[in-house]
Image (cartoon, helix red, strand yellow):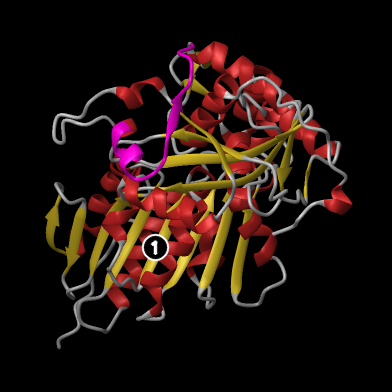
Amino acid sequence: MEEVEVEVDYQPRAAFEAFHERKQRWAVIVAHRRAGKTVATVNDLIRRALQDGKQNARYAYVAPLYGQAKAVAWDYLRRFSEPLLANANETELRVDLINGARIRLYGADNPDTLRGIALDGVVLDEVADMKPRVWSEVIRPALSDRNGWATFIGTPKGHNAFHDIWQRAQDDPEWFTLRLKASDTHIIDDAELKSAREQMSDDQYAQEWETSFEAAIQGAYYGRELLEADNQGRISNVPIDKAVPVHTAWDLGIGDSTAIWFCQQVGKEVRVIDYYEASGVGLDHYAKVLQAKGYLWGDHIVPHDAAVRELGSGKSRIETLGTLGIKVRIAPKFGVDDGINAARLLLARCWFDKARTADGVELLKQYRRAWNEERKTFEPRPLHDHTSHAADALRYLAIGLKAERKLEPIKYSNLGIV
C-alpha cells in the first residue's frame, strides 16, 4: 500500500506528550478542569486507530451519559479525524478511518450497547460518574479478545471507583499515570485561577483545580452522615442474623436500573447488610436474586408508582412481583426533600456491611444537588444520574420502614455469619 502523509490539526500540550508516547497498556489521567484531557485522549484514539494494522479495528470513547459523549467529544472527533475520514455517521456518533478502523462514542448510562463487542482501545471519561460495574462487567471483557488498552480520565469527586483506580495504578509498572494540577501545568493563567479561588470554596477549588481526592463532594446530600458513620466504625463487618427478618427497599426502574437495599432491625439499630443493582433485566431476575440469597424475609418496600398498571401487560409491577412470590408494601408518598431528611435521620442509626454494601455506599456519597452552570449555584433538587437509584431506594427505606421492632439486641458473638 502506498504511504500517504496526512497532517492533523493537533499539537499536543507539553503536559500530555508523555501520555502519547507511553508503552503501558493501561493509563489513568487525573487532570484539572480545562487541562485539555478530552482533546488529548480523542487524538490518542485517532492516532492509535490509524496505526492499527488489523482489519476491522474498533475503538471507543465512553462518557457517563450518551448525550454527554456527543456534547463533549463528537466535535473533537469529527474535526481531528477529518483528513483521515472514509465516513462519518453522526447518528451513531461514529467515524470510519481510511485504514478501516472505527471509533465510536458511547454512554455508560446504557452499557448494554457495549455488550458483545470487541475493542482494541477505549477511553473512559469522567470515570467518577460511572457505575463501577460498567468497566468490570462490560468494557474490560470487550478488550480481552484483542488484548485492547484503556485510558481512564477525570477530575476527582471524592473516594470512589476513579480514586481506587488511581491508587492501584501508582506502583504498578503496567500502568501509566499522570496527575495535572493547575498550579503545576500553568495552562490556566494565574489571574484566572486567582479569580476562581475567590469565587469558590476551598474544597471546590482543591477538587476542580488541584485535583484533590480528599475534598468533599460539593452539594452532596449524605456526605456528613456517611463520614460520621465511617468515623464511628459503623461501616465495617456487619454479621447477618439468620433468625432476624431481612427487609428490602426498592427503586424500580422502567428501562433503567433497579436498586435494592437489604437491612435488619435489631433494637434501635438498622443493619444494612446488602445492596444490589442491575439494569436491562425483568422483575423475574430480581426474584431469582432474592431466592438465591436465602434470607428470612420481612417487608419488601416499593414506591407508590409501582401500583400503576403498565399499558403493555395491563398489570402493575406490584402484581407482577406478587406472581413471582414477592409480596410488597407501598412506601408512604412523601416529597423528595422530606424523603431526604428522613434518610438522614435513618443514616444516624445505620450500620453498613463494608463489603456487601460498598457499591451502594459509594453511590450515596456521590448523590448530590444539581448544579446550574449558568448561575453558578446549586439547584434545590437532586441531580438525576447513576447515583439516583441507590439514593431513591434509601429514601423509600427511610419512609417505609416500620417502627422499631421489639427485638432484644443480640450479642455479635452469637450471630450466625454468612
**Mark 1 burial class by Cα count in 10 Å: few <14, some 14-19, many 20+:** some
The x and y percentages for residue 256 are 33, 40
Q: Along the horizontal axis of the image, is 120 left or right of 292?
A: left
Residue 7 pos. (x, y %): 27, 65
- Is residue 326 shown in magenta? yes
Residue at position x 62%, y 22% in the image:
343
For disc 1, the marked residue is 138
Identify the secondary structure beneath mark 1. Answer: helix
Q: Is residue 343 left or right of residue 41?
A: right
Residue nearest the observer in this picture, 202 or 266: 266
Q: Residue at x 53, y 45 (%)?
A: 35
User: Is residue 46 positioned above or below 345 on the image?
Assistant: below
**Residue 50 falls in image quadrant:** bottom left
Residue 207 lies, with reference to residue 306, above or below; the image says: below
Question: Magenta segment range?
Answer: 319-334
For the C terminus, the quadrant is bottom right
Where residue 416 sits, quadrant-wise, is bottom right
In the rendered structure, which amino acid carries the disc numbered 1?
A: Val
Q: Is residue 336 above or below residue 113?
A: above
Q: Nearer the viewer, residue 370 or 7?
A: 370
Residue pictured at 44% horizontal, 72% vertical: 149
Residue 14 seen by the camera: no
